[in-house]
Image: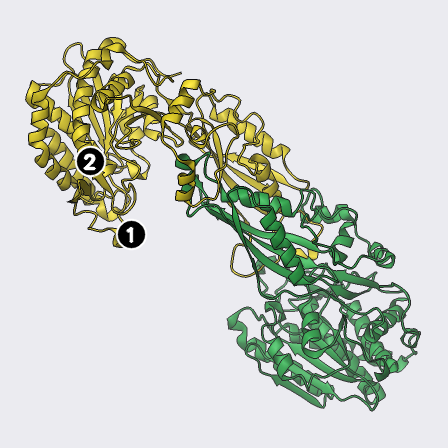
Chain colours: A yellow, B green
Amino acid sequence: MASTGGNAVQEGPPEPQPALDAYLRAARSRHLAELCELIAIPSVGALPEHGPDMARAAAWIAARLDAIGCPEAAVCPTAGHPAVIGRWPAPPGAPTVLVYAHYDVQPADPLELWTTPPFAPEVRGGRLYGRGASDDKGNLLLPLRAIEALTSVEGGLPVGVTFLCEGEEEIGSPSLPALLSVQRERLRADVALSADGIMWSSELPSLLVGSKGLLALDVQVRCAAGDLHSGLHGGMAPNAAVALAHVLARLVAADGEILVEGFADDARPLSDAERAEVARAPFDARAYAAGIGASALVGEPGYTPLERNWHRPTLDVNGIWGGFQGEGAKTVIPAGAGAKITCRLACGQDPDRVAAAIERHVQASLPPGAEAEVVRQAGGSPAFEIDPGHPVLAAARGALRASYGFDPLLMRMGGTLPIAELLQRELGLDVVLLSWSMPDEGLHAPDEFVRLENLDRGARVYADLLHRLAAAGAASHPEAQG
Amino acid sequence: MASTGGNAVQEGPPEPQPALDAYLRAARSRHLAELCELIAIPSVGALPEHGPDMARAAAWIAARLDAIGCPEAAVCPTAGHPAVIGRWPAPPGAPTVLVYAHYDVQPADPLELWTTPPFAPEVRGGRLYGRGASDDKGNLLLPLRAIEALTSVEGGLPVGVTFLCEGEEEIGSPSLPALLSVQRERLRADVALSADGIMWSSELPSLLVGSKGLLALDVQVRCAAGDLHSGLHGGMAPNAAVALAHVLARLVAADGEILVEGFADDARPLSDAERAEVARAPFDARAYAAGIGASALVGEPGYTPLERNWHRPTLDVNGIWGGFQGEGAKTVIPAGAGAKITCRLACGQDPDRVAAAIERHVQASLPPGAEAEVVRQAGGSPAFEIDPGHPVLAAARGALRASYGFDPLLMRMGGTLPIAELLQRELGLDVVLLSWSMPDEGLHAPDEFVRLENLDRGARVYADLLHRLAAAGAASHPEAQG
């Protein structure tokens, strides 16, 4: 994917909009107070005792939608925590953009590591501290600020907007698939944005344009009918823990190269432009390794660490078990041992084919006396990437370039983006993630914060982006990804 | 160790002792009834609710010692279950033999798999069924039957006997070291026998002449400061489960060969006579493998499976762990992973040196990005073997040869014999195990039984053996093993 180019219609400089800027400046302290109100609602979806808070937060958002003139705002019950949907119909001939966000937050513990209480938001040095400040309450309000400014200043929106805010993102969005399916008609849109995401840094704005697929399987090795006494059977009986070690050592080399025959055959090769885009990201491998406490990085030879993380398929052993794990010694020869494996898949890879390749490799790698069962876990998914010519991507790049004065980094992530997969599958929409969450803002950790200047910029960029999407128009209706 | 030869004094045919035989024949049904009485006491040392039964069993044995004229029989309290000690002083110039046994038994569950209740002993087809029939109540009464016959028929014993019967063998003899230490003077003897042991089969009598040492250590591999998200860190961060797999695969080859540099350097090589002795044991590797449910046997090349089990040092991974072991999938890169390792050591090996060799090998085998800590578990011990010229061994071989008409198999075991190590360490005594427990008698399992004809023979062999020990005399006082 090229780091430059795109659709000229959406790439121009922003139209000067002094009235919009003035509105947002004037509303700044009220917007901050609103965000503090929302953060003060401890909407921790994982903890049952916060059930009433989830309802309060959903009601707060629906009220906020009403307040900014949303003609159709509603709290939507689900099997879990409620979602909120707000719709602004599209002006004639204009496209509709779905904007995704979530109001639930991670648990706040350990509480003692917070400088100020997590649900008592406080501004210190240009940062607003509180659970959810960055993930995702600060960001979820950005499109609403932009909508409020546009409708106030311009008397309406240049595009249709469907705002979808769920309350279960931090617990895996269990109710979202059913909600999308039931509300498909109501959620119909032309393009999609997510206000939940990550940005490389304040200095280097970014858009997330791809994420990896996922494949999970269990390997169970068996060597005997039951555990055996290492005295009675030592030197004779095969040992399942040793056998598993050989199987795993033959899956992944000591230097991290994945040895599975045919593993990466279908992975789309990196283009020179993609390598150049990875190289734009200021990534200090030494500092990264020190940060995670590792003495060396490992992985597929021929690629930089970040190229591997963004683009190349990976295989990790997530857990191993077998035999005796207690205190002291137990002289047992384990009859069975197992491992959990997940792969992050690159674009072009089919989870079924990769799973078959791993199973073949495991079976071919078995030491004498060992048998193996490879069981695929449910829920694998292919990688996601957005078409480089997709109008929502072009518009978002244009809006960021206009704001920052240079092209945003087209980031990828080594992880899986369930929302991208879900919006694609249920609604046929490709999504661009546009958020001002920074990796250093304590997401899921104590002292979470958001940078206030980024929120100011973000609201302005969202407003500009809605104009650009209108300019791109319904003519450039996106094609589904291959 | 030669399979033939020995001390001519103790090797002659048994003196015909028709009176002794007649006595034992006459007492047979009473002796069986006594054994049934003892089995009916559910002396399950592992279960606290059987505390009173332990006391009853100890009292029963002490009473039995009284009944056969033991001049000094006593129940000895310990920190755990009581022991019983009975002493017959040695005639002038004659040696004293310590005879070890245990009255505690394994738990009987699963009860539903017993044909008749475990503590309601029943004779069926020449076999006495019941928990402890073989391990060790049937065998513990053999020396007492012999002593009773000798004192009745001959008016006294040809040697001194110290009978030591503990009640904690099945739970690892936790109180025995202290008991041996405290009672050292009272337990002083010239030679030792154990009525707890194993015999190859009814057709092939055997004596256990060696067991392996033990060494236990934990290997802990660490790759990062904490578990990492496989999406954020995939393709970059080292994986501790993979690193551990490489470490273990480099300790033991896929075919079971131990790869630790210098691992077996100090192991005393097998003599041709020892290989011939192993070959005497009818061991069908194919049937053995089928019996344990293994499709192949593994181990050091150049040795038969039984040679490895009896004589060669072994290394087993007893357990492995790391990362996520629960249901489903968790996309984590484990920061740590560990393994428990035990080695069965051959004669000549020093546990400290082997442990150092393993630690060196582990450190030298670490993949990039991994660190390892090797922690030695307490309680290692060197291998045990009895001197081939030891008088108690020669006497026992002679007694068995006299009874069966051919030389007993000089067995070894791949396991560790704590009692041998303990008697050696605390009392300076080498022990020969002489028991008619057969491996097929359901030891530690449902429907445990003992063959009644073996008990008849065993009592007679014990009586003959005491005579032979007297003939060998105090002159052949054993030397401590090197």
- Circle 2 marks a residue in which chain? A
Is A460 on the left-hand or right-hand side of B274? left
x%, y% of residue A469? 21, 16
x%, y% of residue B38? 65, 75
On screen, residue A94 above or below B103: above
Task: Look at 48% across and 38% down and name the residue there.
Answer: A297
Compare marks 2 and 1 and give the one earlier in the sequence.
Answer: 1
Is B479 on the left-hand or right-hand side of B355? right
Location of mark 2 (residue): A138
Q: Are marks 2 and 1 on the same chain?
A: yes
Task: Look at 29% across and 52% down and name the residue there.
Answer: A110
Is A465 on the left-hand or right-hand side of A263? left
x%, y% of residue A325? 52, 54
- Circle 1 marks a residue in which chain? A
Picture quadrant of residue A201: top left
Task: Look at 39% across and 26% down and name the residue there.
Answer: A278
The quadrant of the rendering that contains the C terminus of chain B is bottom right
Count neighbours of disc 2 (C-alpha within 10 A) and say few if under 14, some if 14 to 19, many if 20 or more: many
The label shown at residue B66 is none
The quadrant of the rendering that contains the N terminus of chain B is bottom right
Give whichever of B246, A342 is nearer the camera.
B246
Residue A103 visible in the current orientation = no
Location of mark 1 (residue): A110
Give whichever of B251, B10 is nearer the camera.
B251
Q: Amino acid at mark 1?
A: Pro
Q: CA distance from mark 2 to mark 1?
A: 22 Å
Q: Which secondary structure lies at badge 2? A: helix
Q: Amino acid at mark 2?
A: Gly
Residue A436 visible in the current orientation = yes
